[in-house]
Image (spheres, rainbow, N blue to C red):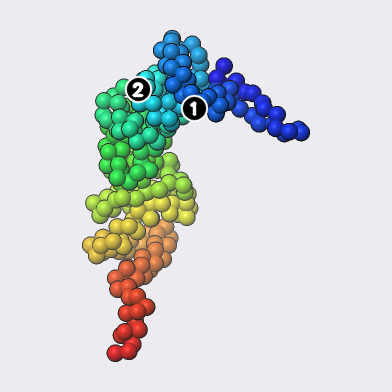
């Protein structure tokens, strides 16, 4: 009954809502007894329901009961893909000790695909883990169904994955205004241009700023990238002026950004020194 709702009067018509386990957690003064009871019930067959397992595992991980970490990890893996199993996964990722376990390859080998993708999505918030996440998602990508690919490609495109980009070129309709496409170098430029050209055949170019943002990164960051983008855009405009004339505006804007980036920054104190000279 851990997940049963209870209501505690708080004067007048006010009352506070609890789950029963939350109430026990708040008022239990002897953590040893509570952990002992949880350990006993968690080793029973899975007859207490996902929401109870969720409450118990989150408690143990949150309170850093390290002796039960492995049990919580196993429970998260064994439960179906659901709110409860993902809540346990989130708690495990927020705990520094259990997070290290989840980063190991043998853990992912035990996890079902949907949980893997959820965990990869959470890990992707840490930029230092992007390479690991990208490789992990790419490894699983060919085994996914279309729905899973459409979800995972968003993650891949945000980390400069060529596998994700090639999939988007074959399926340009999946791209929408909410996508973040970044991390690509000049080698990806022809593929990005191909994706953009196909995408604006379907909808107005204003819907695909995310693709242009990825091209902008290439154009602004290096002279070679700028020259490549400038040459390709000019060729596209000559080839189909009506379709690509708007690219002139982006070339002007990116040119200004390049000049701003090349202009040395000076503090106010340095300016005053120069003026006094």
Q: Quadrant of residue 244?
A: bottom left
Quadrant for the N terminus in the image: top right
Foreground disc of the pair 2, 1: 2
- The residue where tag 2 is placed is 67
Q: Secondary structure at mark 2?
A: helix
Tag 2: Cα neighbours inside 10 Å, few (<14), some, or many (≥20)?
few
Residue 38 placement (x, y as % from top left): 45, 17
> Label 2, label 1: how many angstroms apart (C-alpha)?
25 Å
Of 14 and 263, the residue lying toward us:
14
**Extreme residue toward the front, this view:** 29
- The residue where tag 1 is placed is 83
Residue 224 placement (x, y as % from top left): 23, 62
Q: Vertically, is 267 above or below 182? A: below
Residue 31 seen in render: yes
* Residue at image point 32% right, 57% down: 217
Of 197 and 263, the residue lying toward us:
263
Whether pointer 2 and pointer 1 mark residues with C-beta atoms closer than 8 Å, the reply is no
Residue 18 placement (x, y as % from top left): 61, 27
Query: Viewed as shown, does residue 24 lie left or right of 185?
Result: right
Q: Vertically, is 231 above or below 85? A: below
Q: How many marks?
A: 2
Residue 90 placement (x, y as % from top left): 42, 32
Of 34 and 239, the residue lying toward us:
34
Quadrant for the C terminus in the image: bottom left
* Residue at image point 38% right, 34% down: 95
* Residue at image point 30% right, 73% down: 264
2 or 1: tag closer to the N-terminus: 2
Q: Secondary structure at mark 1?
A: helix
């Amino acid at each position: 009954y851990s997940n049963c709702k209870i209501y505690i009067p708080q004067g007048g018509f006010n009352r506070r809502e609890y789950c029963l386990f939350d109430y026990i957690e708040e008022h239990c003064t002897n953590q040893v007894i509570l952990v002992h009871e949880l350990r006993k019930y968690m080793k029973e067959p899975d007859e207490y329901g996902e929401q109870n397992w969720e409450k118990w595992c989150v408690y143990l991980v949150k309170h850093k009961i390290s002796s039960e970490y492995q049990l919580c990890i196993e429970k998260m893996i064994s439960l179906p893909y659901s709110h409860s199993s993902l809540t346990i996964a989130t708690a495990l990722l927020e705990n520094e000790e259990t997070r290290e376990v989840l980063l190991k390859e043998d853990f992912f080998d035990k996890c079902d695909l949907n949980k893997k993708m959820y965990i990869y999505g959470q890990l992707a918030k840490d930029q230092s883990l992007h390479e690991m996440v990208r490789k992990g998602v790419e490894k699983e990508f060919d085994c996914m169904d279309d729905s899973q690919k459409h979800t995972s490609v968003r993650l891949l495109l945000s980390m400069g994955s060529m596998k994700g980009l090639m999939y988007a070129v074959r399926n340009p309709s999946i791209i929408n205004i909410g996508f973040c496409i970044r991390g690509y170098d000049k080698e990806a430029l022809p593929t990005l241009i191909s994706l953009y050209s196909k995408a604006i055949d379907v909808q107005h170019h204003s819907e695909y700023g995310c693709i242009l943002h990825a091209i902008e990164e290439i154009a602004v960051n290096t002279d070679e990238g700028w020259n490549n983008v400038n040459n390709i855009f000019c060729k596209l405009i000559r080839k189909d002026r009506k379709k690509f004339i708007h690219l002139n505006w982006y070339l002007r804007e990116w040119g200004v950004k390049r000049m701003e980036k090349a202009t040395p920054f000076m503090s106010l104190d340095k300016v005053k020194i120069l003026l006094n000279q």
